[in-house]
Amino acid sequence: MNKLTRKIRLALLSPALIIATVFSTVNIGQAQTSALRIVGRDAAINTTTNLQVWSGRSSVIDFSQTGEVIIYIRLADPSRAVFNTDAELKTNQARTIFVQPIQPLQFPGATTANITNLFVKTRSPEGIERLYTFNVVHQNGQPTNNGIAISTIVPGQEPSVTLADNRTAALSDIERGLDIAILRGYTPPNDPVVFKVREFIALARNGTAIAKAAERTNLSMSVVISLGQLGLSREPLYEIPKTPSQKLPL
């Protein structure tokens, strides 16, 4: 496995250690079961997302799929809604916010709005801070959802790995990288690492989070990242001569 990783890195002329962030995939079936509306992280950062709330019910904003923890919350008008989190912010373990409407209160000197805004600041495992904005929209009638799940991917897209240069490698890129590695002789097709990679891809495509799939198959993330980078290269897949000269020294 280490030989394969080193060979791929040499082929990509990448002498530096690859550092990457692995983003978990969204299990769409679970999201539908829990009736959470999935919002892509990029969309949630670049636009204001509506959070619908109903009398007598709580609506959630969940960051579990992104791996981010909540570090700050600001509700502009606290006279018509309250919130709490699944853990205290100071513990750096809070990932879910629960927002519930209340009977209107009056605070001296404060202004109110029918639709107020909610600011949420998060921190990723890599230390990246992001600011999200939401409109708290009070609704009547039958509830249509239980809140929002912020996701690193949009439903229908493949799970992906983010590389050190901020490019994104999807499972199809990792699979292509494996094919190139075999064709170029970096690893034989019957090598145990090949079977691990194929099992990893199958698990991830069936809803297992990427990090968990790598753990279950005992596959190093450095191999996954290297294959993703190789798959994103411009190497033609079916024009690579399968000769000993293609092998690179350790």
Image: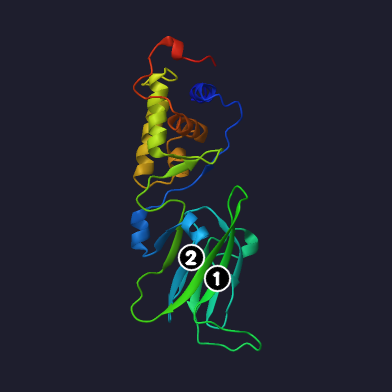
Find out whether the residues at labels 1 and 2 contact each other: C-beta distance under 8 Å: yes
Where residue 187 sits: x, y (%)? 43, 20
Give the structural element (helix, strand or loop) at label 1. strand
Q: Which mark is drawn over residue 61?
A: 2
Where residue 91 sits: x, y (%)? 63, 60
Q: Earlier in the sequence, mark 1 or mark 2?
A: 2
Q: From the viewer's perspective, is residue 154 above or below residue 13? A: below
- Which residue occupies 50% across, 53% down? 66
The quadrant holding residue 13 is: top right
Residue 229 visible to the viewer:
yes
Query: Which amino acid does the dot numbered 1 rest on?
Result: Leu
- The answer to whether residue 229 is left or right of residue 16 is left
The quadrant holding residue 173 is: top left
Query: Which amino acid does the dot numbered 2 rest on?
Result: Ile
Between the C-alphas of marks 1 and 2, the distance is 11 Å
Where residue 25 sits: x, y (%)? 42, 48
| Quadrant location of the C terminus in the rendered image | top right
Where residue 21 sits: x, y (%)? 54, 43
